[in-house]
Image (tube, grey):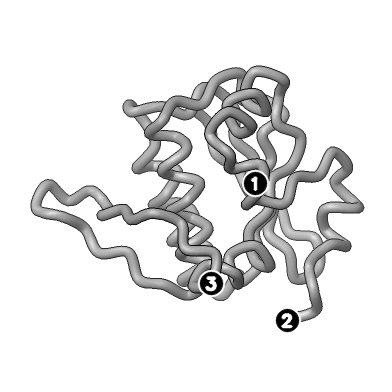
Amino acid sequence: MQISFSKHGDVTVMHLKGDVDSSNYTDVIVRAQEVYNEGSRNLLLDLVKVPYVSSAGLMAFHTIARIFAGHSIKGGENGRPTFRSINPTEDALARDRFKLLNPQPAVEQVLDVIGLNQFFEIHTDLDAGVRSFSPS
């Protein structure tokens, strides 16, 4: 898994390359938390080079959405973040601050089956994805 970032105005794009699974999902969360702590408030997650996302990867996406909605993620006894279900009322801000870009067909299918495609805003064009964020 490779993680890199680019800035587009007040939007940070997190570029992932490789599978997002149980071997690396915490790295994805930690790196997202770092850019949030550095002041980023809008995150567009670029999935164009991600061929596979496991359930752990989906939990990472949900956790990152909660981070960018301003919620604290506290680690459990094993140091991993604790998770909870999506609450449309409490997590509404997450939709405004965290969006997905270019999921591959297999990843898009997983998002559809799980129902996260109804929660996360998904874009297929970088410029449109960046413009979709409200000014912060």
The image position of residue 28, as x and y in percent, is 45, 43
Spatial CA distance of label 3 from label 1 is 22 Å
Q: Nearer the viewer, residue 72 or 23?
A: 72
Q: Secondary structure at mark 2?
A: loop
> What kind of residue is marked 2?
Ser
Spatial CA distance of label 1 from label 2 is 18 Å
Q: Secondary structure at mark 1?
A: strand
Q: Residues within 10 Å of mark 3 (few under 14, many from 20)?
A: few
The image position of residue 1, as x and y in percent, is 48, 27
Q: Nearer the viewer, residue 118 or 49?
A: 118
- Seen in the image, is 129 located left or right of residue 21? right
Q: Which residue is mark 1?
A: 45
Q: Quadrant of residue 136?
A: bottom right
First-in-chain label (2 vs 3): 3
Q: Residues within 10 Å of mark 2 (few under 14, many from 20)?
A: few
**Which numbered dot is residue 89?**
3
> What kind of residue is marked 3?
Thr
The image position of residue 121, as x and y in percent, is 72, 51
Which residue: 84% across, 38% down?
A: 124
The image position of residue 36, as x and y in percent, is 51, 67
Foreground mark, 3 or 1, reads 3
First-in-chain label (1 vs 2): 1
**Which numbered dot is residue 121?**
none
> What kind of residue is marked 1?
Leu
Q: Which residue is mark 2?
A: 136
Foreground mark, 2 or 3, reads 3
Quick check: 74 above or below 135?
A: above
Spatial CA distance of label 2 from label 3 is 20 Å
